[in-house]
Image (tube, rainbow, N blue to C red):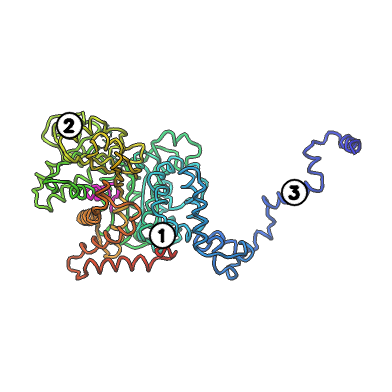
Amino acid sequence: MLAALAASGAALGNVSKVDVALATPLRASMRATDRAGTATPASSARAPRPPGYAAMRDANVYHGAATMDRENRGLDGLLPSRAVNDEVELARARAALGQCESAFASYKQLVSLQTTDKRTFYQLLRADTADVLPYVYTPTVGEACLRFGTLVQRPHGLWVSLNDAGSVRRLVRNWPERDVKIAVITDGERILGLGDQGANGMGISAGKSMVYAACGVPPSALLPIQLDVGTNNETLLDDPLYIGLKQKRERSEAYDALLDELIVEIRDYFGPNTIIHFEDFAPRNAFRLLQKYYSAPDVVTYNDDIQGTAAVTVSGLLASVRALKGTNNDLTRQRVLFFGAGQANIGAAELFVKALVNRGVDEAEAKRRVWLFDSKGLVVRSRASELSDAKLPFAQDAPKETDLASAIEHIKPTALVGASAVPGAFTQKVVRAMSRSNDQPIIFALSNPTSKAECSAEDAYRWSDGRAIFASGTRSAPVEYSPTKTFAPGFANNAFIFPPIAIATILTGAKQVTPDMFLTAAEALADSVGDDLFRVGAVYPPVERVASSAVAVAAAVASSVDDSSTDTLDRWRELVRAYIIDNDLFDSASRL
Ligand code: NAI
């Protein structure tokens, strides 16, 4: 045998080993298969695929081993023969999620489920909201945006780049759904506290859309959009896996023209009442665009980073004030120091002033209760020439101050709200300063993800001797402060605000989403926090309640929109529930 092989090798002369291998019958048949894979014969390319092929790839149809109507869809033989029900598929999805070894792996698992089997995905999102949201939304979505270029899943959402100027109409009309009610648009310039992530910002638009869905907005009504206008993030520009345009951010009028074109086409195709939700724009554009489109006739729009955050922050302040013991438990007695003077805190400062004015405080006096602190220190009049239009109304008549603890000693605020993305800014000295002038200092460290938080819950309780009323921007684990006291602090998240605002807007047909609507949402959310939560130090409902809270908050907002309506709050609750049930295409509400 060995001799025969040697002889045949000798007879082949200088033919390569590879050619010898391919000359064997087995290799020859593999070669034919390879060829078939790369160059399909013309006759078979024209033959239509059986319908089961498309059905398997349609996330609205494919439902794992629970896929229905197999015979009609040509699916017999393409799935394991034993059909199961929704419960089994849900259990399978939970098991798959349980096998993920990191938060990012869980994110990938969930996004993959969303793009292959929507029914199971949305059922899981509704049934296990508190477990699923931290992966598809904050905090994991931040990591997902950082690593977006390594995702191999089918991308979700609509991608509109500078190169599409003039043809956005065609792109919008490629979207497979016609009943879109909310377009979540980002340009990726200020993703959470992570800065410019360019086209990777799609993770945020998609994540926010999932929060809407978790609260009962039908998934087909949601359109996540990434506006790709370049990035100034050098790491991304150097990354061969970066998915966006490899150019610096567009700062000329071409930027505005592209956004205008997009908004016109969205309204033209999906209807003029389509909500334009602006998400994670940098301050330079966020305030400007909100003002521009808010005052445009009939454009239904809001900026979640400004207005949604404002409402959730003011809600936390309202609830905290109710939790205060003694005579200080009145919003009009509060003095708030906002650390970070960007979209989040300026929006919150404006809404806080509105809340005071609604309670009878003169506007000028209300503004004196608000102090802003930005990267250059206290926002004071002597800095007027360098202050933006948004900060200027809050500039106080006071000396310059660049040290936060000293500013606290001087101002003696009752509440300190951090939205600066400066990790650890609330040092022991800062928390101690707050605790010296307040029996129960209100301290919110709202920046997220967790790596950007101004302080941890544990530090806030420890440094205030357990007296702080604390809330964070990302869910904190319970803190065992003493053998007899465990805190389970609240989690300030816009997820409690933007879904009910949208539902109320859709149901009432409101033509503008007004500051009053956001204030009503804040008040309704605060009202839903009861003594059970105060006892453990929480000023927000737990995230498990995000969907039920959305019903109550949406009803309150809707009833405030139309004064002439005779519908009571209870009636609005029924209408909100009916909207959710009637649009529940994936039978997910029944999982609550
Ligand atoms: P932004 O970029 O508009 O504002 C950041 C502000 O922080 C700027 O005014 C900047 O001057 C200030 N700042 C930077 N360095 C500073 C320093 N050393 N000292 C004092 N101030 C400093 O950002 P935005 O939208 O206001 O968000 C800020 C943070 O809040 C982010 O981490 C964001 O993720 C978080 N956030 C949390 C929300 C929640 O629901 N928990 C909602 C919205 C934002």
Q: Earlier in the sequence, mark 1 or mark 2?
A: 1
Region rendered in magenta: 302-315
For residue 427, above or below residue 362: above
Q: Earlier in the sequence, mark 3 or mark 1?
A: 3
Q: Secondary structure at mark 2?
A: helix
Q: Earlier in the sequence, mark 2 or mark 3?
A: 3
Q: Which residue, given by chain and number where applicable, does mark 3 sit on? A: 30
Q: Position of residue 285 (x, y in %)?
A: 29, 43
Q: Which mark is residue 219?
A: 1
- In the image shown, does 376 or 352 lie closer to the viewer? 352
**CB of mark 2 within 8 Å of CB of mark 3?**
no
Q: Nearer the viewer, mark 2 or mark 3?
A: 2
Residue pictured at 49% horizontal, 49% vertical: 98
Q: Quadrant of residue 20?
A: top right
Q: CA distance from mark 2 to mark 3?
A: 76 Å
- In the image shown, does 568 or 274 lie closer to the viewer? 568
